[in-house]
Amino acid sequence: MRSWIVGLALAAAVIVPSWAVQAAGDPGWPTYGGDQGGQRFSPANQITPANVKNLKVAWTFSTGDMTTHADAMHRASFENTPILAEGKLYVCSPFNEVSAIDPGSGYVFWRFDPKLNADMHYPNDFICRGVAFASNLGAPNTLCATRIYLNTADRRLIALDARNGKLCPGFGKNGTVVIGEGPQTEGPHNRYGRIHTTSAPVVSHGVVIVGSSIDDNQKVDELRGTVYAYDAKTGALKWSFDPLAGSPKGYRAGAANVWAPMSIDEQRGLVFLPCTSASPDFFGGLRRGSGKYANSIVALHVADGTVAWSFQTTHHDVWDYDLPAQPTLGMVTYNGKTVPAVLQPTKQGLLFTINRDTGAPIIPVVERKVPQDPAAGDQLSPTQPIPIAPAPLAPSHITPDDAFGLTFWDRGRCHDMIAAARNDGLYTPPSARGTIIYPFTGGGSNWGGIAFDPAHDVVYANTMNVMHLVTLIPRREFTAARERFFDKEVSPNTGAPFGMMRQTMLGPLGVPCNPPPWGQLHAIDMHTGKILWSVPLGSMGSIADWLLGSAGVPNLGGPIVTAGGLVFIGATLDNHIRAFDAKTGAELWKADLPAGGQATPMTYMWKGKQYVVIAAGGHSKLDTTRGDTVVAFALPD
């Protein structure tokens, strides 16, 4: 009976255009960020603060990874946000396997496996945040007239027919292009990848644009973080952009790559890049100066890759404060003037509001003096750019007396750790003594980005509030330090006079040394830059919450906002998805997930019903519960 019903549904799907079963005016969720500008906003309004408590699981889908990749799941992070386009949901597993499924049932239409080498050690484990969809690439209903573009961990860009998952033969070599140039691997037995891709490509004006992810703190002369654009039909290289090209003579560095999602302004023909820091992260003595386009929002012309404008958010970065999130595009009315804007959150907990046409700040940015006295051979910028509004979304100052602990014992240990480190506030330079990096290099904000409600000019952002201790290790002491601290992150920075060690500042009981909340969700009114509300995000469990109050927890993944007046977010360590009242920040609903929900959800209307969908598969860095499930929630019939 079920097969018969599914067969009728499939037949109907062939006859009825996809738009006929979506709500009028609802675009679905055709790109990773909801739209090309990454607003993560949906006009769907069936689910409201009044009825959200009634949400139930509507269907689930398994990628099968827990069976097919059981031995590699400890290195996998299911960060995917599915997209909805022309009647199908497209899901990408951490191992770059793409499935097309029915939006109302989770039924699988097709599946594509790129046969990723799971024995390879990639810089950021196995991650696929999303895929890209493109249409009008041929006559209707012909082969590859609509396509799914997938970039893989082993540096392939693959074009698939969106209808059936078959490779597009006219794209590159049998549907595949090798991204960039040079060898992919190095090290013993060629099992250590040097560069890969984690975020979805973007498609605009007939080109597919891809960034890259490069391992941190390995060497001075790291691979360059070149962005590539390929012809969407043929796969031919159209242009490339190296953020460090044209650096001054004697400037030694690599990276400055674009690992976070990019954004597109179709009307202006611009692609917006969130560029990262130059290598290595914590010592810049061999890369004097601000770093060209490193740590910058860079607007490129899609047609030829030339720079329209750029804005740097951190000068001469030695804190790993690269741009970790998609630049979000929206019309912002600040102080009564409506301007096309780029909204860029940062790891420091700052939010920059930049004019999309000129690259000039809409909300003013001031250059403030910051701590100096860097490591020997380095030269810092005397100032750093700070927007006057909103106020920082994450704390950056702590004293030994502020140390947190569950007992006098672990609080005392944290007190001593803070007192022993160099700690002059935000932008304190790394040192051989050990320097507190606060917020830590995971944020503030991270790859989950922000959500923007264009009807009310309100930004929603989640943050982490934890500290790192970064210690520079003189070269002559590095080998001994790596052997001594074999269980910690110790990296060589080959070519620099210092290696480095980075550790999260936790007490003996595993609790952060800084006071809670350790995770928050914020709402910002962009008319004024005022923070409307900030609430703890996540729970440590009933007993811990009773002892500590609402402490919030570290989180990875981002929020979405709907016209129904709700903010949905997973992200937290506690394996839940939640809904908050967009006006007040009150938590109205939460549901258990079968594994960690370290992914950004999405939502859409389908056959008269609104669904909220999230990938629940856990995260290797946060070590949350592993799984391979996509979960859809909806109101009961």
Image (cartoon, rainbow, N blue to C red):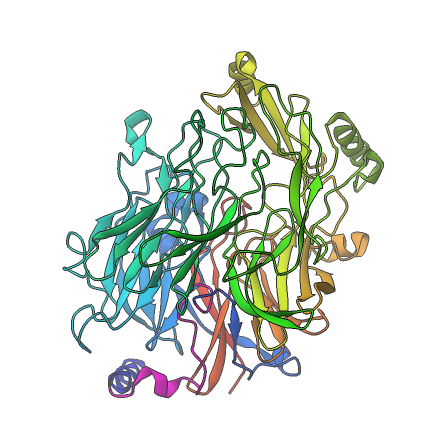
Say whether residue 367 is left or right of residue 116: right
Q: Where is residue 12 in the image (x, y as percent from the top left)?
A: 27, 87
Residue 591 visible, this angle? no
Q: Position of residue 496 (x, y in %)?
A: 49, 21
Say whether residue 518 is left or right of residue 503: right
Quarter holding residue 213? top left
Residue 602 visible, this angle? yes
Q: Does the magenta stretch include residue 19?
A: yes
Q: Nearer the viewer, residue 397 or 198?
A: 397
Q: Where is residue 234 in the image (x, y as percent from the top left)?
A: 18, 58
Instruction: Identify the main secondary structure in magenta.
Output: loop
Give the vertical position of 368 relative to 222 (above or below).
below
Give the vertical position of 435 relative to 277 (above or below).
above
Q: Which of 464 and 512 is in front in this view?
A: 464
Q: Nearer the viewer, residue 113 or 561?
A: 561
Q: Residue at x 51, y 15 (%)?
A: 479
Quarter holding residue 511? top right
Q: Does the magenta stretch include residue 196?
A: no
Q: Nearer the viewer, residue 415 or 438?
A: 438
Q: Position of residue 184 (x, y in %)?
A: 29, 36
Say whether residue 587 is left or right of residue 398: left
Image: magenta residue range: 15-35
Query: From the image, which quarter does the N terminus lie in?
Result: bottom left
Q: Which residue is drawn at 49% across and 41% down?
A: 294
